[in-house]
Image (tube, rainbow, N blue to C red):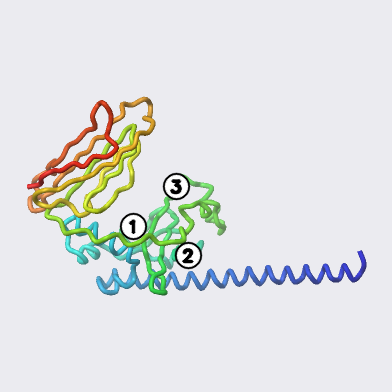
Amino acid sequence: MTADMIQRMLFLTGCLCLTLAGGKALAQQDEAALANTLSRAYAQWREAMIQKNPQAWAEAITSFRQTTIRNQIVSSKEAFPAAVFAALGAPPKTESMRLVEAQAAGTTAHLVYFGKIEGGNETADTNEVLMKLKFGLEGGRWRYDSARVTDLDSSPEVLKTLRMGNKPDLLDAPEFTPPGKMPPAPPLCRVPDFKGGLKLQSTGYETQVFMNGFSYDPVENGLDQQLVLGGFMAGSNDITLRIRPVSSPDDQKPVVRLRLYKIDLTKPEQPAIEVLRWESPISGAPKEVTLPFIVR
């Protein structure tokens, strides 16, 4: 290799190192800027919750989460938006926690913090946790969406890595990766006459529930209990099940069992009243069935 070739190689290598270093610095700057933006978005939502300000809350939270919360409150026969602010205590603080990651993908982003949660319903001596704050990009700005707390008691290696100031591989898992796209806001549910609950057992089948224009996550070889979005109206109602056979666990008998319950909040001393009971035939469950029922 000639001197000119060596000199040229060193020059290119130097450029590469400078480029990589600059790229890393730029990435760090971008992450810091994102963290500041998302932190402000969370602070706006948190302040709205503390001040119990419905307008500020609606402006600070994603439309998906706002509608989801509204539907749950209305379906529970509670007042919206008053019930949003009914919880005791302020939302968690982040100042005493260490920021581990700020990441964005498409119209989604998150902040991941490590430490002990202060505020909310948590006690001061709570264990060290990972707290992920999720955000969505709407109208050209980031809005707070929701939070998820991961207990690290059963993950000593992850806890050790975090205490050393490093990022654990856990943050590469799908649940710690922004999905890239916010789900569309669900439709507004009706204001029901009665709060309703459902219990579904699906063994040897995958069963999905459809009611009041809403679909629920399929249940496969499991038991699920849900608040009925849109509740029950006085008089005629109906619910639809879509059923697909799957392998039964431990040779259990295939069966689908559905129970629907009316919860009359005007009579708190009265237990939930069953308004529908259905079980699949011994000969096998149908692919789809719509079950009408009356609520009085």
Q: Amino acid at mark 1?
A: Glu
Which residue has dot 1 on it? 122
Write the residue at 38% across / 69% down: 143
Measured Cα–Cα span from mark 1 to mark 2: 32 Å
Which quadrant of the figure has residue 248? top left
**Residue at position x 88%, y 68% in the image:** 5
Quick one: label 1 or label 2, which is nearer the N terminus? 2
Residue 216, position as x, y percentages in the image: 30, 48
CA gap between label 3 and label 2 equals 33 Å
Question: Is label 1 or label 2 in front?
Answer: 2
Which numbered disc, 1 or 3, marks the residue that appears first in the sequence?
1
Identify the image quadrant of residue 83: bottom left
Q: Residue at x 39, y 31 (%)?
A: 247
Which amino acid type is shown beneath numbered disc 2?
Answer: Gly
Q: Secondary structure at mark 2?
A: loop
What is the x, y in percent for residue 256? 27, 34
Instruction: State left or right for residue 52 relative to residue 191.
Output: right
Q: Earlier in the sequence, mark 3 or mark 2?
A: 2
Identify which residue, 217 or 17, lies in the foreground.
217
Q: Nearer the viewer, residue 99 or 30?
A: 30
Q: CA distance from mark 1 to mark 3?
A: 16 Å
Q: Residues within 10 Å of mark 3 (few under 14, many from 20)?
A: few
Q: Nearer the viewer, residue 88 or 104?
A: 104
Q: Is residue 21 left or right of residue 86?
A: right
Q: Which residue is mark 3?
A: 153
Say if 220 sits above or below 104 in the image. above
Q: Position of residue 137 (x, y in %)?
A: 41, 69
- Which disc number belongs to residue 106? 2
